Amino acid sequence: MNLDARFQKADKNLDPEYEGQFDLWFEGIRVEVKTARAIDNSRSGEMASRALHWGTEAPFWMNFQQIKLDVGDVFVFIGVWVDKIVYWVLSDEEVKQNDFLSHQHRGGIEYQIGIRNTNIQEFNAFRVEAAALTNAIKLKARIQ
């Protein structure tokens, strides 16, 4: 993550218990990063042709997948529009309690969160600008 040089790729040197379960190490905080593209889910076709601009009225769905609970301290969800990138920062506990969290596969240990045009406002409390990302991560790690 090139936003801040303090983000390090997680490895066993930073966390002896690391086994690939999270993405980044930030000042002792285990950070999992999930990304999704806002796509028009009312049309068919290639994903790139369905990519949306920020503020569009078209129905969209961003599916943040393969969420593993209790392995990281903080989640950074990155939503990508053609002309905007949006960051949401949630603690592991906030992800667990999120109304939009669901199992990804029956009986599996992985979860998913879908952000849609109909529920994006529910995530406003977690939204941060890129410049405030590191402070938000530190804050969320403290509320574990």
Image (cartoon, rainbow, N blue to C red):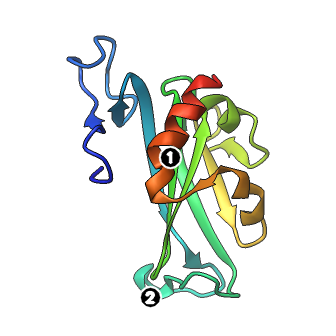
Q: Amino acid at mark 2?
A: Ser
Q: Give the secondary structure at mark 1.
A: strand
| Viewer-nearest residue: 30 or 130 | 130
Q: In the rendering, at what x and y percent does residue 17 appear? A: 33, 12
Q: Which residue is located at x 25 percent, y 36 percent?
A: 9
Q: Which residue is mark 2?
A: 49
Farthest top residue? 16
Helix, strand or loop under label 2: helix
Indicate whether 133 appears above or below 6.
below
Can residue 113 be seen here? The reply is yes
Q: Which residue is mark 1?
A: 76
Among the two numbered marks 2 and 1 on one chain, the one whose residue lies closer to the N terminus = 2
Q: Position of residue 2 (x, y in %)?
A: 27, 53
- Give left or right: position of 111 versus 71: right
Q: Is residue 12 left or right of residue 47?
A: left
Residue 64: horizontal and vertical position, in percent?
55, 53
Along the horizontal axis of the image, is 29 left or right of 117? left
Mark 1: few/some/many CA within 10 Å (<14, 14-19, 20+): many
Total tally of numbered discs in the picture? 2
Q: Are marks 2 and 1 in contact (CB under 8 Å)?
A: no
Q: Disc 1 residue type? A: Val
Marks 2, 1: nearer the viewer: 1
